[in-house]
Image (cartoon, rainbow, N blue to C red):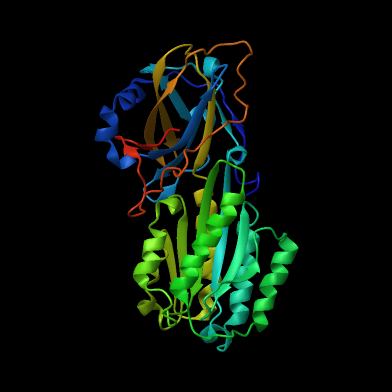
Amino acid sequence: MGSSGWGNRAVNTRSVWNAFRTLVIGGAALGAAACSHLEVTLLNSASEKPNNVWVFFTVEKGDEPVAGLEAEDFEIYEDGELVSVFESKQTIQNPEVAAVMYTLLLLDVSGSITESGEADKLVDAAKQFTESVGQHQKVGVYAFDGDEKLHPVVPFTEAQGKAEGGIEKLRTYKPKDPSTNLHGGVILGIRELKKALDKDKKPLKFGTLVVFSDGSDRAARYSREEMNGELDKLEYANYEMFAIGVGGEIEKAKLDDIGRDGTELVADDAAVTQAFEAIADRIERHMKRFYLLSYCTPARKGDHTVQIVANSTDPKGSGSLEYDFDASGFGPPPECDPERAPNFKLDPGKSQQPAKGKKSRGNGKASASASASVN
């Protein structure tokens, strides 16, 4: 995940607040204008002396990420009162200071792929995918056939040059077991992704699993229920999962169980590259929905309720989140620096708030406009 994906944007002078936005803060306009509602989801927050506050969240409209918002596109209210942008010095920090994103590409190299002449197109598509997504985050490539274990192709620690060389070897790969351990591959793949993320020292971790296959599970080492049970675990609450399927068996494979955030189905290998490009594009766009808002609170004592309102012109809409913080002992010196990196903490055994649409996940408390989890 590189800095080109997320920029650092400072606040500009805002225009006079109008009455409509005041109604939005009260909630009346939000209910009446549901068609223009943005979903603002709190992922984590922190506050520290002298008077720094950080909020990490996503902004979406329906299933689409809302990207490109600037610091002046957010209004900060404390206990119902608008906080002056001059006093708050609010800014959008680069989310990389607190968050990391990994993508694991899991490739089917069973006999139906390697013996059918599809391997070359798969290798070309996988190389293009890793080059595209790898510009902004770490990418690992693993393969499965009928064996009970995964086959590492490109570990997350490999540089771009070695990654291309590792994928190239798949052109001549011959599976020892030509069967298809799809369910087992997915289970082991998501575990491998989590293991890699757990080693990273950033406090906020987001993973993406992308699975390519041309058919059904034939090895029967794991049942579909066991696979779904693994994917439903809370520890994968903030993981996104995509699937790419090709060939005549694809309807029986029911890849939508795996591709919970998106599935690309193609009838033949000629369209494999386009399918990989579509998933890579979705991953890159989804990265841009993350925001790390930092500001200096005017509060100096006691508990306070903060509401952050996001306003977007393209697409048009507004949405908000709420959380509470304790300002006891706040106040300079030293002077508050909004560019200071946050110190987010996660409770043991808990993850960030889950992305929407994930079944059987999450333990957050929902409000009218956001699901909040404050550590």
Please state which of residues 307 and 205 is positioned toward the viewer in this rendering: 205
Q: Measuring from the top left, give residue 361's x and y in whole percent.
A: 36, 51
Q: Could you tell me which residue is drawn at 48 percent across and 11 percent down?
A: 300
Q: Measuring from the top left, give residue 210's x and y in whole percent.
A: 51, 64
Q: Could you tell me which residue is drawn at 60 percent across and 57 percent down?
A: 133
Please state which of residues 170 and 40 is positioned toward the viewer in this rendering: 170
Determine if residue 151 is in view. Answer: yes
Q: Could you tell me which residue is drawn at 36 percent across and 47 percent down?
A: 362
Identity of the residue furthest to the bottom in this view: 115
Q: Measuring from the top left, give residue 347's x and y in whole percent.
A: 47, 38
Q: Is residue 231 above or below residue 64?
A: below
Q: Is residue 173 above or below residue 49?
A: below
Q: Could you tell me which residue is drawn at 52 percent across and 13 percent down?
A: 330
Identity of the residue furthest to the right in this view: 161
Identity of the residue furthest to the front in this view: 348
Q: Is residue 172 above or below residue 285?
A: below
Q: Is residue 209 above or below residue 65?
A: below
Left-right relation of 325 to 3: left
Please state which of residues 113 and 64 is positioned toward the viewer in this rendering: 113
Determine if residue 129 is in view. Answer: no
Q: Measuring from the top left, give residue 277's x and y in whole percent.
A: 55, 64
Left-right relation of 350 to 121: left
- Number of numbered markers: 0
Left-right relation of 187 to 98: left
Q: Quadrant of the C terminus?
A: top left
